[in-house]
Amino acid sequence: MRILQLHCDSIEYTPTKKEIKSAEEIEPKKISIEEVVVCFTAIEEGDDSDTAKNAIIDIQKSMKQIGCNKLLLYPYAHLSSNLASPGTGLKILKEMQESCTGIDAMRAPFGWTKAFSIQVKGHPLAESSKVFSKDSIKEKTSTALESESKIKSYWYIMTPDGKMEEIEKFNFSNHKQLEIFAKYESAKKRSVDEPPPHINLMKKLAIADYEPASDPGNMRFYPNGRLIKSQIEQYVTDKVHDYGGVEVETPIMYDSHHPSMESYFNRFPARQYSIDSEGRHLFLRFSACFGQFLMASDFQLSYKNLPYKLYELTRYSFRREQSGELVGLRRLRAFTMPDCHAFCKDMSQAIDEFRKRFDLSREVLSGLGIEENDYETGIRFTEDFYNKNKELIKQLVSKVGKPVLVEMWKEQFFYFVMKWEFNFVDNLGKASALSTDQIDVENAKRYGITFTDEKNKQQHPIILHNSPSGAVERVIYALLEKFAKQIKDGKRPQFPLWLAPTQVRVIPLKNDFLEFSNDLASKLTKQNIRVDIDDRNDTISKRIRDAEKEWISYVLVIGEKEVKSTSLSVRDRTTGDVRQLSVEDFVKEIHDAISGKPISKLNSPILLSRRPQIMV
Protein backbone atom coordinates (compact mmCIF):
# COMPACT_ATOMS: atom_id res chain seq x y z
CA MET A 1 0.00 0.00 0.00
CA ARG A 2 1.31 3.43 -0.94
CA ILE A 3 -0.07 6.63 0.56
CA LEU A 4 0.57 10.31 -0.05
CA GLN A 5 -0.69 12.01 3.11
CA LEU A 6 -1.44 15.76 3.07
CA HIS A 7 -2.70 18.03 5.83
CA CYS A 8 -4.99 20.43 3.98
CA ASP A 9 -6.85 23.66 4.50
CA SER A 10 -9.38 22.30 2.02
CA ILE A 11 -10.08 19.86 -0.80
CA GLU A 12 -12.82 20.02 -3.40
CA TYR A 13 -13.54 17.18 -5.81
CA THR A 14 -16.20 16.19 -8.34
CA PRO A 15 -16.58 12.67 -9.79
CA THR A 16 -16.75 13.11 -13.57
CA LYS A 17 -17.02 9.63 -15.07
CA LYS A 18 -16.58 5.94 -14.28
CA GLU A 19 -13.04 4.81 -14.94
CA ILE A 20 -13.66 1.05 -14.50
CA LYS A 21 -16.71 -1.19 -14.84
CA SER A 22 -16.71 -2.09 -11.14
CA ALA A 23 -16.78 1.54 -10.01
CA GLU A 24 -19.03 2.30 -7.04
CA GLU A 25 -22.56 3.39 -7.84
CA ILE A 26 -22.92 6.99 -6.68
CA GLU A 27 -24.67 10.19 -7.68
CA PRO A 28 -21.87 12.47 -8.89
CA LYS A 29 -21.76 15.78 -7.03
CA LYS A 30 -19.20 18.32 -5.88
CA ILE A 31 -17.76 17.63 -2.43
CA SER A 32 -15.94 20.29 -0.38
CA ILE A 33 -14.13 19.53 2.90
CA GLU A 34 -12.13 21.91 5.08
CA GLU A 35 -9.41 21.24 7.65
CA VAL A 36 -8.78 17.65 6.65
CA VAL A 37 -6.02 15.07 6.24
CA VAL A 38 -6.20 13.66 2.70
CA CYS A 39 -4.64 10.26 2.08
CA PHE A 40 -4.18 9.53 -1.63
CA THR A 41 -4.07 5.73 -1.50
CA ALA A 42 -3.02 2.95 -3.88
CA ILE A 43 -3.87 -0.64 -2.80
CA GLU A 44 -1.26 -3.08 -4.08
CA GLU A 45 -1.05 -6.83 -4.64
CA GLY A 46 -0.53 -8.61 -1.33
CA ASP A 47 -2.28 -5.98 0.78
CA ASP A 48 -4.86 -7.34 3.23
CA SER A 49 -6.80 -6.47 6.39
CA ASP A 50 -3.62 -6.31 8.48
CA THR A 51 -2.13 -3.83 6.03
CA ALA A 52 -5.27 -1.72 6.34
CA LYS A 53 -5.14 -1.77 10.15
CA ASN A 54 -1.42 -0.90 10.25
CA ALA A 55 -1.99 2.00 7.88
CA ILE A 56 -4.90 3.44 9.87
CA ILE A 57 -3.02 3.14 13.16
CA ASP A 58 -0.17 5.12 11.71
CA ILE A 59 -2.42 7.69 10.00
CA GLN A 60 -4.39 8.34 13.18
CA LYS A 61 -1.18 8.67 15.16
CA SER A 62 0.11 11.38 12.84
CA MET A 63 -3.32 13.10 12.76
CA LYS A 64 -3.27 13.32 16.54
CA GLN A 65 0.17 14.88 16.38
CA ILE A 66 -0.99 17.68 14.05
CA GLY A 67 -4.38 18.10 15.77
CA CYS A 68 -6.73 17.18 12.93
CA ASN A 69 -9.75 14.85 13.29
CA LYS A 70 -11.06 14.67 9.72
CA LEU A 71 -9.74 12.07 7.27
CA LEU A 72 -10.46 11.60 3.58
CA LEU A 73 -9.33 8.33 2.00
CA TYR A 74 -8.88 9.13 -1.68
CA PRO A 75 -8.31 6.17 -4.08
CA TYR A 76 -5.35 7.10 -6.27
CA ALA A 77 -4.06 4.35 -8.54
CA HIS A 78 -1.27 6.54 -9.97
CA LEU A 79 0.95 5.93 -6.92
CA SER A 80 1.75 2.35 -7.97
CA SER A 81 2.20 0.12 -11.00
CA ASN A 82 1.51 -3.02 -8.93
CA LEU A 83 -2.16 -2.55 -8.10
CA ALA A 84 -4.44 -5.06 -6.42
CA SER A 85 -7.63 -6.09 -8.23
CA PRO A 86 -10.44 -3.50 -8.10
CA GLY A 87 -12.47 -5.75 -5.80
CA THR A 88 -9.62 -6.08 -3.31
CA GLY A 89 -8.83 -2.39 -3.54
CA LEU A 90 -12.38 -1.34 -2.69
CA LYS A 91 -12.65 -3.93 0.11
CA ILE A 92 -9.46 -2.73 1.82
CA LEU A 93 -10.42 0.94 1.51
CA LYS A 94 -13.73 0.17 3.20
CA GLU A 95 -11.90 -1.71 5.96
CA MET A 96 -9.60 1.26 6.47
CA GLN A 97 -12.57 3.58 6.85
CA GLU A 98 -14.31 1.21 9.26
CA SER A 99 -11.13 0.81 11.35
CA CYS A 100 -11.00 4.51 12.20
CA THR A 101 -11.90 5.45 15.77
CA GLY A 102 -12.55 8.87 17.25
CA ILE A 103 -12.25 10.72 13.94
CA ASP A 104 -14.54 11.69 11.09
CA ALA A 105 -13.42 9.26 8.33
CA MET A 106 -14.65 9.81 4.77
CA ARG A 107 -13.91 8.10 1.50
CA ALA A 108 -13.88 9.41 -2.07
CA PRO A 109 -15.66 7.11 -4.57
CA PHE A 110 -13.66 4.18 -5.93
CA GLY A 111 -13.25 3.67 -9.69
CA TRP A 112 -14.14 7.18 -10.77
CA THR A 113 -12.19 9.88 -12.58
CA LYS A 114 -12.40 12.98 -10.42
CA ALA A 115 -11.62 16.65 -10.91
CA PHE A 116 -10.16 18.11 -7.73
CA SER A 117 -8.50 21.16 -6.26
CA ILE A 118 -6.55 21.09 -3.01
CA GLN A 119 -4.91 23.58 -0.63
CA VAL A 120 -2.09 22.00 1.38
CA LYS A 121 -0.86 23.59 4.59
CA GLY A 122 2.72 24.80 4.77
CA HIS A 123 4.02 23.34 8.03
CA PRO A 124 6.84 20.74 8.06
CA LEU A 125 4.52 17.82 8.91
CA ALA A 126 1.89 18.64 6.30
CA GLU A 127 3.26 16.34 3.61
CA SER A 128 4.42 12.74 3.95
CA SER A 129 4.67 9.68 1.76
CA LYS A 130 4.29 6.18 3.22
CA VAL A 131 4.57 2.54 2.26
CA PHE A 132 2.83 -0.28 4.19
CA SER A 133 2.92 -4.06 3.85
CA LYS A 134 1.55 -7.07 5.72
CA ASP A 135 4.71 -7.70 7.68
CA SER A 136 5.93 -4.25 8.51
CA ILE A 137 5.17 -0.57 8.35
CA LYS A 138 7.70 1.12 6.12
CA GLU A 139 6.87 4.78 6.21
CA LYS A 140 8.79 7.78 5.17
CA THR A 141 7.95 10.35 7.78
CA SER A 142 6.46 9.08 10.99
CA THR A 143 9.60 7.22 12.03
CA ALA A 144 11.54 10.40 11.51
CA LEU A 145 8.97 12.44 13.38
CA GLU A 146 8.89 10.00 16.27
CA SER A 147 12.67 10.13 16.56
CA GLU A 148 12.69 13.89 16.14
CA SER A 149 10.21 14.34 18.96
CA LYS A 150 12.63 12.60 21.31
CA ILE A 151 15.71 14.60 20.38
CA LYS A 152 16.71 17.26 22.88
CA SER A 153 18.92 20.25 22.16
CA TYR A 154 21.26 21.86 24.66
CA TRP A 155 22.28 25.42 23.83
CA TYR A 156 25.60 27.01 24.75
CA ILE A 157 27.91 29.85 23.82
CA MET A 158 31.53 28.87 23.16
CA THR A 159 34.15 31.58 23.45
CA PRO A 160 37.39 31.72 21.39
CA ASP A 161 39.32 30.21 24.28
CA GLY A 162 37.16 27.06 24.02
CA LYS A 163 35.00 27.58 27.11
CA MET A 164 31.31 26.64 26.88
CA GLU A 165 28.71 28.50 28.89
CA GLU A 166 24.98 27.84 29.08
CA ILE A 167 23.18 30.30 26.87
CA GLU A 168 21.07 31.66 29.74
CA LYS A 169 24.19 32.59 31.72
CA PHE A 170 26.20 34.22 28.93
CA ASN A 171 26.66 38.00 28.98
CA PHE A 172 25.59 39.27 25.54
CA SER A 173 26.21 42.95 26.30
CA ASN A 174 29.13 43.12 23.83
CA HIS A 175 27.62 40.64 21.37
CA LYS A 176 24.19 41.98 20.44
CA GLN A 177 24.10 40.39 17.01
CA LEU A 178 24.96 36.99 18.49
CA GLU A 179 22.14 37.48 20.99
CA ILE A 180 19.67 38.16 18.17
CA PHE A 181 20.88 35.04 16.34
CA ALA A 182 20.65 32.88 19.48
CA LYS A 183 17.10 34.03 20.23
CA TYR A 184 16.08 33.50 16.61
CA GLU A 185 17.41 29.94 16.59
CA SER A 186 15.76 28.97 19.86
CA ALA A 187 12.40 30.54 18.90
CA LYS A 188 12.40 28.98 15.39
CA LYS A 189 10.07 31.75 14.12
CA ARG A 190 10.85 31.98 10.42
CA SER A 191 7.92 34.10 9.21
CA VAL A 192 8.25 37.88 8.91
CA ASP A 193 5.90 40.61 10.07
CA GLU A 194 7.10 43.36 7.71
CA PRO A 195 9.03 43.54 4.43
CA PRO A 196 12.81 43.61 4.97
CA PRO A 197 14.57 46.60 3.40
CA HIS A 198 16.41 44.59 0.76
CA ILE A 199 13.11 44.16 -1.12
CA ASN A 200 12.97 47.85 -1.93
CA LEU A 201 16.61 47.83 -3.02
CA MET A 202 16.28 44.75 -5.26
CA LYS A 203 13.45 46.51 -7.10
CA LYS A 204 15.00 49.97 -7.12
CA LEU A 205 18.26 48.63 -8.56
CA ALA A 206 16.36 46.46 -11.10
CA ILE A 207 17.90 43.26 -9.74
CA ALA A 208 14.90 41.02 -9.07
CA ASP A 209 11.19 40.99 -8.37
CA TYR A 210 8.34 38.63 -7.64
CA GLU A 211 6.88 36.69 -10.56
CA PRO A 212 3.07 36.72 -10.15
CA ALA A 213 2.62 34.08 -12.85
CA SER A 214 4.75 31.54 -10.96
CA ASP A 215 4.59 29.76 -7.62
CA PRO A 216 5.56 32.07 -4.72
CA GLY A 217 9.27 31.92 -3.97
CA ASN A 218 10.22 31.68 -7.67
CA MET A 219 11.73 35.05 -8.65
CA ARG A 220 12.43 36.87 -11.89
CA PHE A 221 15.92 38.35 -12.32
CA TYR A 222 16.38 41.39 -14.55
CA PRO A 223 19.57 41.95 -16.61
CA ASN A 224 21.35 43.56 -13.64
CA GLY A 225 20.37 40.72 -11.34
CA ARG A 226 21.31 38.04 -13.85
CA LEU A 227 24.77 39.54 -14.25
CA ILE A 228 25.30 39.73 -10.48
CA LYS A 229 24.12 36.14 -10.09
CA SER A 230 26.35 34.98 -12.93
CA GLN A 231 29.40 36.65 -11.40
CA ILE A 232 28.77 35.09 -8.00
CA GLU A 233 28.16 31.67 -9.54
CA GLN A 234 31.41 31.84 -11.50
CA TYR A 235 33.41 33.12 -8.54
CA VAL A 236 32.26 30.35 -6.21
CA THR A 237 32.76 27.72 -8.93
CA ASP A 238 36.30 28.98 -9.60
CA LYS A 239 37.10 28.78 -5.88
CA VAL A 240 35.79 25.21 -5.67
CA HIS A 241 37.81 24.25 -8.75
CA ASP A 242 40.92 25.70 -7.08
CA TYR A 243 40.11 23.64 -3.99
CA GLY A 244 39.94 20.49 -6.12
CA GLY A 245 36.24 20.10 -6.81
CA VAL A 246 35.20 18.08 -9.87
CA GLU A 247 32.15 19.63 -11.52
CA VAL A 248 29.21 17.44 -12.56
CA GLU A 249 25.55 17.88 -13.47
CA THR A 250 22.67 15.78 -12.17
CA PRO A 251 18.87 15.63 -12.71
CA ILE A 252 16.50 17.95 -10.87
CA MET A 253 13.86 15.24 -10.18
CA TYR A 254 13.94 11.76 -8.67
CA ASP A 255 11.64 8.80 -8.04
CA SER A 256 10.51 9.02 -4.42
CA HIS A 257 10.17 5.21 -4.35
CA HIS A 258 13.76 4.55 -5.34
CA PRO A 259 15.19 2.45 -2.46
CA SER A 260 17.75 5.09 -1.47
CA MET A 261 15.10 7.83 -1.51
CA GLU A 262 12.65 5.79 0.57
CA SER A 263 15.36 5.14 3.12
CA TYR A 264 16.24 8.84 3.21
CA PHE A 265 12.69 10.08 3.69
CA ASN A 266 12.11 7.38 6.30
CA ARG A 267 14.66 9.28 8.41
CA PHE A 268 14.34 12.89 7.34
CA PRO A 269 11.04 14.55 6.42
CA ALA A 270 11.35 17.30 3.85
CA ARG A 271 9.19 19.85 2.11
CA GLN A 272 9.39 18.96 -1.55
CA TYR A 273 7.56 19.63 -4.79
CA SER A 274 5.92 16.45 -6.05
CA ILE A 275 5.19 15.37 -9.63
CA ASP A 276 3.19 12.38 -10.84
CA SER A 277 4.38 11.07 -14.19
CA GLU A 278 3.51 7.79 -15.90
CA GLY A 279 2.56 6.09 -12.65
CA ARG A 280 5.66 7.27 -10.80
CA HIS A 281 5.77 9.70 -7.90
CA LEU A 282 8.68 12.09 -8.47
CA PHE A 283 10.00 14.96 -6.39
CA LEU A 284 12.10 17.99 -7.32
CA ARG A 285 15.48 17.93 -5.61
CA PHE A 286 16.12 20.24 -2.69
CA SER A 287 19.90 19.70 -2.89
CA ALA A 288 22.51 18.10 -5.14
CA CYS A 289 23.02 15.26 -2.66
CA PHE A 290 20.75 12.75 -4.40
CA GLY A 291 22.32 13.04 -7.83
CA GLN A 292 25.91 13.17 -6.62
CA PHE A 293 25.43 10.19 -4.28
CA LEU A 294 23.79 8.07 -6.97
CA MET A 295 26.64 8.99 -9.31
CA ALA A 296 29.28 8.17 -6.68
CA SER A 297 27.66 4.77 -6.06
CA ASP A 298 28.65 3.84 -9.64
CA PHE A 299 32.29 4.83 -9.15
CA GLN A 300 35.01 2.28 -8.40
CA LEU A 301 36.84 4.22 -5.71
CA SER A 302 40.13 3.38 -4.04
CA TYR A 303 41.46 4.90 -0.84
CA LYS A 304 44.09 6.45 -3.15
CA ASN A 305 41.31 8.50 -4.81
CA LEU A 306 40.12 9.98 -1.53
CA PRO A 307 39.24 12.60 -0.60
CA TYR A 308 37.26 12.85 -3.84
CA LYS A 309 35.26 16.04 -4.28
CA LEU A 310 32.15 16.31 -6.45
CA TYR A 311 30.69 19.76 -7.14
CA GLU A 312 27.53 21.04 -8.76
CA LEU A 313 26.05 24.48 -9.02
CA THR A 314 22.36 23.54 -8.83
CA ARG A 315 20.18 25.82 -10.87
CA TYR A 316 17.78 25.07 -9.37
CA SER A 317 17.12 23.36 -6.06
CA PHE A 318 13.50 23.38 -4.85
CA ARG A 319 11.99 23.47 -1.39
CA ARG A 320 8.36 24.05 -0.45
CA GLU A 321 8.97 26.69 2.20
CA GLN A 322 5.97 28.01 4.08
CA SER A 323 4.33 31.00 2.44
CA GLY A 324 4.87 33.28 5.46
CA GLU A 325 8.62 32.76 5.11
CA LEU A 326 8.79 33.70 1.42
CA VAL A 327 9.87 37.33 1.55
CA GLY A 328 12.21 38.77 -1.07
CA LEU A 329 15.45 36.88 -1.70
CA ARG A 330 15.95 35.65 1.86
CA ARG A 331 14.09 32.36 1.56
CA LEU A 332 12.93 30.97 -1.79
CA ARG A 333 11.29 27.86 -3.16
CA ALA A 334 13.65 27.77 -6.15
CA PHE A 335 17.26 28.70 -5.51
CA THR A 336 20.79 28.30 -6.87
CA MET A 337 23.02 26.30 -4.52
CA PRO A 338 26.74 25.60 -4.96
CA ASP A 339 27.06 22.11 -3.46
CA CYS A 340 30.38 20.31 -2.92
CA HIS A 341 30.63 16.82 -1.40
CA ALA A 342 33.92 15.28 -0.32
CA PHE A 343 34.17 11.50 0.08
CA CYS A 344 36.74 10.69 2.78
CA LYS A 345 38.24 7.34 3.79
CA ASP A 346 37.91 7.82 7.57
CA MET A 347 37.09 10.36 10.26
CA SER A 348 40.68 11.58 10.50
CA GLN A 349 40.75 12.47 6.80
CA ALA A 350 37.26 13.94 7.01
CA ILE A 351 38.29 16.26 9.85
CA ASP A 352 41.38 17.43 7.95
CA GLU A 353 39.18 18.21 4.95
CA PHE A 354 36.57 19.81 7.20
CA ARG A 355 39.17 22.35 8.36
CA LYS A 356 40.14 23.22 4.77
CA ARG A 357 36.52 23.79 3.77
CA PHE A 358 35.95 26.00 6.81
CA ASP A 359 38.79 28.24 5.62
CA LEU A 360 37.54 28.05 2.02
CA SER A 361 34.08 29.24 3.03
CA ARG A 362 35.41 32.18 5.05
CA GLU A 363 37.54 33.19 2.08
CA VAL A 364 34.61 32.90 -0.34
CA LEU A 365 32.32 35.08 1.79
CA SER A 366 35.02 37.70 2.22
CA GLY A 367 35.57 37.75 -1.54
CA LEU A 368 31.83 38.31 -2.01
CA GLY A 369 31.90 41.34 0.27
CA ILE A 370 30.49 39.64 3.37
CA GLU A 371 33.04 40.08 6.15
CA GLU A 372 33.35 38.25 9.47
CA ASN A 373 31.54 40.98 11.40
CA ASP A 374 28.56 40.57 9.04
CA TYR A 375 27.68 37.05 10.21
CA GLU A 376 27.46 34.84 13.29
CA THR A 377 28.61 31.25 13.52
CA GLY A 378 26.52 28.30 14.65
CA ILE A 379 28.13 24.93 15.41
CA ARG A 380 26.03 21.82 16.06
CA PHE A 381 27.16 18.34 17.10
CA THR A 382 26.31 15.26 19.09
CA GLU A 383 27.67 14.98 22.59
CA ASP A 384 29.65 11.88 21.61
CA PHE A 385 31.32 13.67 18.69
CA TYR A 386 32.18 16.63 20.91
CA ASN A 387 33.79 14.42 23.55
CA LYS A 388 35.96 12.76 20.90
CA ASN A 389 36.81 15.91 18.90
CA LYS A 390 36.96 18.84 21.31
CA GLU A 391 40.17 20.17 19.79
CA LEU A 392 38.64 20.42 16.31
CA ILE A 393 35.68 22.42 17.60
CA LYS A 394 37.88 24.68 19.72
CA GLN A 395 40.16 25.34 16.72
CA LEU A 396 37.22 26.37 14.54
CA VAL A 397 35.86 28.73 17.19
CA SER A 398 39.34 30.15 17.72
CA LYS A 399 39.55 30.95 13.99
CA VAL A 400 36.22 32.77 14.17
CA GLY A 401 37.71 34.94 16.90
CA LYS A 402 34.44 35.70 18.66
CA PRO A 403 31.80 33.71 20.60
CA VAL A 404 29.66 31.27 18.62
CA LEU A 405 26.30 29.61 19.22
CA VAL A 406 26.51 25.89 20.04
CA GLU A 407 23.71 23.33 19.79
CA MET A 408 24.50 19.92 21.24
CA TRP A 409 22.36 16.77 20.95
CA LYS A 410 22.54 13.92 23.46
CA GLU A 411 21.86 11.42 20.67
CA GLN A 412 22.34 11.40 16.90
CA PHE A 413 19.19 12.04 14.94
CA PHE A 414 20.37 13.59 11.68
CA TYR A 415 22.61 11.89 9.14
CA PHE A 416 25.46 14.14 10.30
CA VAL A 417 27.28 14.20 13.63
CA MET A 418 28.52 17.76 13.23
CA LYS A 419 27.80 20.83 11.15
CA TRP A 420 28.60 24.50 11.20
CA GLU A 421 27.05 27.42 9.37
CA PHE A 422 27.71 31.14 8.98
CA ASN A 423 24.47 33.05 9.58
CA PHE A 424 23.71 36.53 8.33
CA VAL A 425 21.48 38.53 10.69
CA ASP A 426 19.37 41.08 8.80
CA ASN A 427 17.77 44.38 9.73
CA LEU A 428 14.64 42.67 11.10
CA GLY A 429 16.59 40.32 13.36
CA LYS A 430 16.13 37.29 11.11
CA ALA A 431 19.06 34.90 10.67
CA SER A 432 19.81 33.08 7.43
CA ALA A 433 22.49 30.47 6.88
CA LEU A 434 25.06 31.19 4.18
CA SER A 435 28.09 28.85 4.12
CA THR A 436 27.78 25.45 5.79
CA ASP A 437 29.47 22.05 6.05
CA GLN A 438 28.37 18.73 7.59
CA ILE A 439 30.06 15.46 8.56
CA ASP A 440 27.73 12.76 7.21
CA VAL A 441 28.12 9.23 8.62
CA GLU A 442 25.00 7.61 7.11
CA ASN A 443 24.40 8.36 3.45
CA ALA A 444 27.32 6.41 1.99
CA LYS A 445 25.74 3.21 3.28
CA ARG A 446 22.25 4.35 2.27
CA TYR A 447 23.34 4.96 -1.32
CA GLY A 448 25.74 2.02 -1.60
CA ILE A 449 28.86 4.18 -1.99
CA THR A 450 32.03 2.18 -1.30
CA PHE A 451 35.79 2.33 -1.74
CA THR A 452 38.57 -0.24 -1.53
CA ASP A 453 40.82 0.31 1.49
CA GLU A 454 44.52 -0.51 2.01
CA LYS A 455 43.62 -4.11 2.89
CA ASN A 456 41.57 -4.54 -0.31
CA LYS A 457 38.30 -4.50 1.66
CA GLN A 458 35.17 -2.54 0.78
CA GLN A 459 34.37 0.37 3.11
CA HIS A 460 31.83 3.19 3.19
CA PRO A 461 33.35 6.67 3.03
CA ILE A 462 32.44 9.57 5.29
CA ILE A 463 30.80 12.36 3.27
CA LEU A 464 31.19 16.10 3.82
CA HIS A 465 28.44 18.42 2.57
CA ASN A 466 29.72 21.94 1.88
CA SER A 467 28.23 25.01 0.28
CA PRO A 468 31.03 27.59 0.38
CA SER A 469 28.64 30.52 -0.05
CA GLY A 470 25.15 29.22 0.56
CA ALA A 471 22.41 29.94 -1.98
CA VAL A 472 23.45 32.56 -4.54
CA GLU A 473 20.16 34.44 -4.14
CA ARG A 474 20.72 34.58 -0.38
CA VAL A 475 24.17 36.09 -0.92
CA ILE A 476 22.52 38.92 -2.87
CA TYR A 477 19.96 39.30 -0.07
CA ALA A 478 22.75 39.56 2.52
CA LEU A 479 24.61 42.17 0.47
CA LEU A 480 21.47 44.26 -0.03
CA GLU A 481 20.56 44.05 3.67
CA LYS A 482 24.11 45.13 4.50
CA PHE A 483 23.77 48.06 2.10
CA ALA A 484 20.39 49.00 3.63
CA LYS A 485 22.06 49.27 7.03
CA GLN A 486 24.79 51.45 5.53
CA ILE A 487 22.14 53.79 4.09
CA LYS A 488 20.44 53.96 7.49
CA ASP A 489 23.80 54.88 9.03
CA GLY A 490 24.26 57.69 6.51
CA LYS A 491 26.87 55.87 4.41
CA ARG A 492 27.04 55.49 0.64
CA PRO A 493 26.55 51.83 -0.36
CA GLN A 494 28.27 50.23 -3.31
CA PHE A 495 28.59 46.76 -4.79
CA PRO A 496 32.12 45.37 -4.96
CA LEU A 497 33.36 46.65 -8.33
CA TRP A 498 33.53 43.16 -9.88
CA LEU A 499 29.82 42.65 -9.08
CA ALA A 500 28.60 46.06 -10.28
CA PRO A 501 26.37 45.62 -13.37
CA THR A 502 27.90 48.82 -14.80
CA GLN A 503 31.37 49.73 -13.58
CA VAL A 504 31.84 52.95 -15.57
CA ARG A 505 29.29 55.37 -17.02
CA VAL A 506 30.28 57.85 -19.68
CA ILE A 507 28.12 60.99 -19.90
CA PRO A 508 28.72 63.26 -22.91
CA LEU A 509 27.73 66.88 -22.20
CA LYS A 510 26.14 67.08 -25.66
CA ASN A 511 25.84 65.05 -28.85
CA ASP A 512 29.00 66.65 -30.25
CA PHE A 513 30.96 64.52 -27.78
CA LEU A 514 29.13 61.26 -28.43
CA GLU A 515 31.68 59.98 -30.96
CA PHE A 516 34.52 60.54 -28.51
CA SER A 517 32.45 58.85 -25.78
CA ASN A 518 31.87 55.84 -28.03
CA ASP A 519 35.59 55.55 -28.77
CA LEU A 520 36.44 55.79 -25.08
CA ALA A 521 33.82 53.20 -24.14
CA SER A 522 35.19 50.88 -26.82
CA LYS A 523 38.73 51.18 -25.40
CA LEU A 524 37.50 50.43 -21.88
CA THR A 525 35.35 47.51 -23.06
CA LYS A 526 38.39 45.95 -24.71
CA GLN A 527 40.04 46.11 -21.28
CA ASN A 528 37.22 43.93 -19.85
CA ILE A 529 35.52 46.86 -18.15
CA ARG A 530 31.72 47.12 -18.13
CA VAL A 531 30.96 50.59 -19.43
CA ASP A 532 27.82 52.25 -20.76
CA ILE A 533 26.94 55.67 -22.19
CA ASP A 534 24.12 57.91 -21.02
CA ASP A 535 23.19 59.49 -24.36
CA ARG A 536 19.71 60.51 -23.26
CA ASN A 537 18.44 64.03 -23.91
CA ASP A 538 18.43 65.03 -20.24
CA THR A 539 20.33 67.64 -18.27
CA ILE A 540 23.80 66.74 -17.08
CA SER A 541 22.72 67.10 -13.46
CA LYS A 542 19.85 64.62 -13.92
CA ARG A 543 22.09 62.10 -15.64
CA ILE A 544 24.66 62.35 -12.85
CA ARG A 545 21.88 61.90 -10.25
CA ASP A 546 20.64 58.83 -12.11
CA ALA A 547 24.15 57.37 -12.05
CA GLU A 548 24.18 57.98 -8.28
CA LYS A 549 20.81 56.24 -7.90
CA GLU A 550 22.15 53.24 -9.82
CA TRP A 551 25.29 53.11 -7.63
CA ILE A 552 27.62 53.48 -10.64
CA SER A 553 31.17 53.25 -9.30
CA TYR A 554 32.82 55.63 -11.77
CA VAL A 555 31.26 58.42 -13.84
CA LEU A 556 33.15 60.11 -16.68
CA VAL A 557 31.63 63.40 -17.85
CA ILE A 558 32.89 64.21 -21.34
CA GLY A 559 33.08 67.84 -22.49
CA GLU A 560 35.39 70.04 -24.53
CA LYS A 561 38.08 69.90 -21.83
CA GLU A 562 38.10 66.07 -21.71
CA VAL A 563 38.14 65.71 -25.49
CA LYS A 564 41.26 67.90 -25.75
CA SER A 565 42.97 66.48 -22.64
CA THR A 566 45.05 63.33 -22.23
CA SER A 567 43.41 62.65 -18.86
CA LEU A 568 39.90 61.80 -17.66
CA SER A 569 37.77 63.55 -15.05
CA VAL A 570 36.78 60.58 -12.89
CA ARG A 571 33.90 60.91 -10.43
CA ASP A 572 34.57 58.25 -7.78
CA ARG A 573 31.50 57.06 -5.90
CA THR A 574 33.63 55.64 -3.08
CA THR A 575 35.20 58.99 -2.14
CA GLY A 576 32.76 61.40 -3.75
CA ASP A 577 35.73 63.21 -5.33
CA VAL A 578 36.56 64.08 -8.94
CA ARG A 579 40.08 63.01 -9.88
CA GLN A 580 42.19 63.52 -12.98
CA LEU A 581 43.58 60.20 -14.27
CA SER A 582 45.12 59.05 -17.52
CA VAL A 583 43.25 56.31 -19.33
CA GLU A 584 46.09 53.91 -18.50
CA ASP A 585 46.02 54.71 -14.77
CA PHE A 586 42.23 54.52 -14.71
CA VAL A 587 42.26 51.08 -16.32
CA LYS A 588 44.96 49.91 -13.90
CA GLU A 589 42.92 51.10 -10.91
CA ILE A 590 39.93 49.08 -12.07
CA HIS A 591 42.00 46.01 -12.89
CA ASP A 592 43.60 46.13 -9.44
CA ALA A 593 40.15 46.35 -7.83
CA ILE A 594 38.75 43.35 -9.72
CA SER A 595 41.89 41.22 -9.72
CA GLY A 596 41.18 37.53 -9.16
CA LYS A 597 37.47 37.91 -9.82
CA PRO A 598 35.39 36.71 -12.80
CA ILE A 599 34.95 38.97 -15.81
CA SER A 600 31.65 39.43 -17.65
CA LYS A 601 30.53 41.70 -20.42
CA LEU A 602 27.85 44.34 -19.99
CA ASN A 603 24.43 42.67 -19.93
CA SER A 604 22.43 45.58 -21.40
CA PRO A 605 22.64 47.82 -24.49
CA ILE A 606 25.59 50.16 -24.11
CA LEU A 607 23.44 53.22 -24.92
CA LEU A 608 20.92 54.05 -22.20
CA SER A 609 18.55 55.44 -24.86
CA ARG A 610 18.22 51.87 -26.19
CA ARG A 611 17.12 50.37 -22.88
CA PRO A 612 13.46 49.88 -21.90
CA GLN A 613 12.33 51.30 -18.60
CA ILE A 614 11.67 48.59 -16.02
CA MET A 615 8.51 49.39 -14.08
CA VAL A 616 8.96 48.36 -10.44
Image (tube, rainbow, N blue to C red):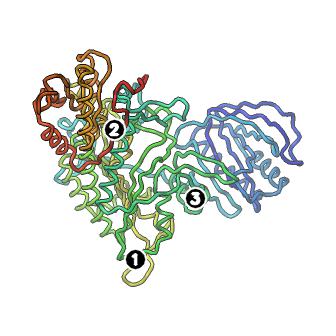
Q: Give the residue type at disc 2.
A: Leu
- Quadrant in the rendering for residue 36: top right
Q: Give the residue type at disc 3.
A: Glu
Q: Position of residue 325 (x, y in %)?
A: 45, 34
Mark earlier in primary sequence (2, 3)? 3
Residues at marks 1 and 3, CA–CA distance in whole angstroms: 28 Å
Whether residue 99 is situated above or below residue 291 in the rendered picture: above
Task: Give the number of the disc on residue 302.
Answer: 1
Q: Are marks 1 and 3 in contact (CB under 8 Å)?
A: no
Q: Are marks 1 and 2 in contact (CB under 8 Å)?
A: no
Query: Circle 2 sits in a helix, a strand or a loop, which is it?
Result: loop
The answer to whether residue 285 is seen in the rendering is yes
Q: Position of residue 562 (x, y in %)?
A: 15, 27
Residues at marks 1 and 2, CA–CA distance in whole angstroms: 46 Å
Q: Are marks 2 and 3 in contact (CB under 8 Å)?
A: no
Q: Would residue 613 appear left or right of 17 to someone viewing this image? A: left
For this orientation, the residue located farthest to the top is: 539
Q: Position of residue 529 (x, y in %)?
A: 25, 40
Q: Give the residue type at disc 1.
A: Ser
Query: Circle 1 sits in a helix, a strand or a loop, which is it?
Result: strand
Mark earlier in primary sequence (1, 3)? 3
**Disc 2 designates what residue?**
602
